[in-house]
């Protein structure tokens, strides 16, 4: 069967699908992964077919940030969605029997699949279905909400998504010859959605429809040719396990972060491996090594603690490694995951980026390292996560919804 996985966004929105794609290939399917051009090598190095999606997520964030007004920022995003819709359609018409779609492009991918007469499945890295049990990722933090407020917030997020996608969905629907009713951005309750995180981290809500699943994580694949840089290996072997500091796809150039991280590392009395990321973070210090992209599954188990932006993929990697976490959320779903790891007992209180100081970061690091309960809980949680088989759940859903034989 020809399977197309569609995703859009940062590296963290792409990498988990490389591992999922490899498992689907091992099960006998042909797998293509549609993503932005900056991730073409990542996809191909993992042995998957790459199909191009237009747009650059870095440039999108920079353009929206530089927009002189909210209306201008929305126009930038609308143009991005228009191009993305065309790209999803082109990727799907290149030969596909079933579409798997991440949360971001889901309204576009679901509509394209309907237009082509093929099944589709959501493959979400964050909770994407309203529930009474917790507010949706991206909802402003206002303390614990009531069950009624939680589900109202979830429905409001989907409604806002619908308004953002409305114009492009209408245009795409016209091209595909579909009736106007198909342009709803929110999926019906019977549309299958697989959530790629552990039920030990976010238990499946009891009020979710039967078609919404929590499968366990899909771990990023690693290129078979990858080797750790000699400089990194030497640094790791030259002293006690360092802490990891990285803020992933945070694109703004937060100049003060260089000094904040350098001072915090010195005050906490630790060594650090700092991932430069899209923010080009490069703090100076004798006990600091700055690196580019390094597979988290290789690096994190070799650290004493991880400081990160609490993106979905990085959060999962930290939990899998069994090390304490210092979450520094920035935006979107990151506050949700930061709060979650704190509630799970593997992290102190989150430190939002806009509030981050050297003293606060140093204190959180010492808290993580000096209190064994954080590491003990992290080790226990990692043991549960590692035995789960997230891709198996996706394969089961595919067997339920896909045709027995590929189309000819």
Image (cartoon, helix red, strand yellow):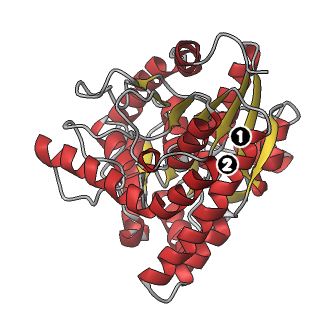
Residue beneath the point at 49% across and 89% down: 68
Q: Looking at the image, can residue 227 be seen?
A: no
Image quadrant in which the C terminus is located: top right
Label 1: which residue? 92
**Callout 2 environment at 10 Å: few (<14), some (14 to 19), or many (20+)?**
many
Q: CA distance from mark 1 to mark 2?
A: 6 Å
Say above or below: 134 vs 391: below
Residue beneath the point at 55% across and 58% down: 247
Q: How many marks?
A: 2
Q: Nearer the viewer, residue 168 or 128?
A: 168
Q: Nearer the viewer, residue 133 or 89?
A: 89
Q: Looking at the image, can residue 120 be seen?
A: yes
Q: Nearer the viewer, residue 304 or 206?
A: 206
Q: Are marks 1 and 2 in contact (CB under 8 Å)?
A: yes
Horizontal and vertical percent position of residue 34: 72, 44
Horizontal and vertical percent position of residue 399: 58, 13
Say above or below: 382 vs 255: above
Say above or below: 356 vs 238: below
Name the residue furthest right. 225
Horizontal and vertical percent position of residue 218: 58, 29
Residue beneath the point at 50% across and 71% down: 260
Label 2: which residue? 88
């Amino acid at each position: 069967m020809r399977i197309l996985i569609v995703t859009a966004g940062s590296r963290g929105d792409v990498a988990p699908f490389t591992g999922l794609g490899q498992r689907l290939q091992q099960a006998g399917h042909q797998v293509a992964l549609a993503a932005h051009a900056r991730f073409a090598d990542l996809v191909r190095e993992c042995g998957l077919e790459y199909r191009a999606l237009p747009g650059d997520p870095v440039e999108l964030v920079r353009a929206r940030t530089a927009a002189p007004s909210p209306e201008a920022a929305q126009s930038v995003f609308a143009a991005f969605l228009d191009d993305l819709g065309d790209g999803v359609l082109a990727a799907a018409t290149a030969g596909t029997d079933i579409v798997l779609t991440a949360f971001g492009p889901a309204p576009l991918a679901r509509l394209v699949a309907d237009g082509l007469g093929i099944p589709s499945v959501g493959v979400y890295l964050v909770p994407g279905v309203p529930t009474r049990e917790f507010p949706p990722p991206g909802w402003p933090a206002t303390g614990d909400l009531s069950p009624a407020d939680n589900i109202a917030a979830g429905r409001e997020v989907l409604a806002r998504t619908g308004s953002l996608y409305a114009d492009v969905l209408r245009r795409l629907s016209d091209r595909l010859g579909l009736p106007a009713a198909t342009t709803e951005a929110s999926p019906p309750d019977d549309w299958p959605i697989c959530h790629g995180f552990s039920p030990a981290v976010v238990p499946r809500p009891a009020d979710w429809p039967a078609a919404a699943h929590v499968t366990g994580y899909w771990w990023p694949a690693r290129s078979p040719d990858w080797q750790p840089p000699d400089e990194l290996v030497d640094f790791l072997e030259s002293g006690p396990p360092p802490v990891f500091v990285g803020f992933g796809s945070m694109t703004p150039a937060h100049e003060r972060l260089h000094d904040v991280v350098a001072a915090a590392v010195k005050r906490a009395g630790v060594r650090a491996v700092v991932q430069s990321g899209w923010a080009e973070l490069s703090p100076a210090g004798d006990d600091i090594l700055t690196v580019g992209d390094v597979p988290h599954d290789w690096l994190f188990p070799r650290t004493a603690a991880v400081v990160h932006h609490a993106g979905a993929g990085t959060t999962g990697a930290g939990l899998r490694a069994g090390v304490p976490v210092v979450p520094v959320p920035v935006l979107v779903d990151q506050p949700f995951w930061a709060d979650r790891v704190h509630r799970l007992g593997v992290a102190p209180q989150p430190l939002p980026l806009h509030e981050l100081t050297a003293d606060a970061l140093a204190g959180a690091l010492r808290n993580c390292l000096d209190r064994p309960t954080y590491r003990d809980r992290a080790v226990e949680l990692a043991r549960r996560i590692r035995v789960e088989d997230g891709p198996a759940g996706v394969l089961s859903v595919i067997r339920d919804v896909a045709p027995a034989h590929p189309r000819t």
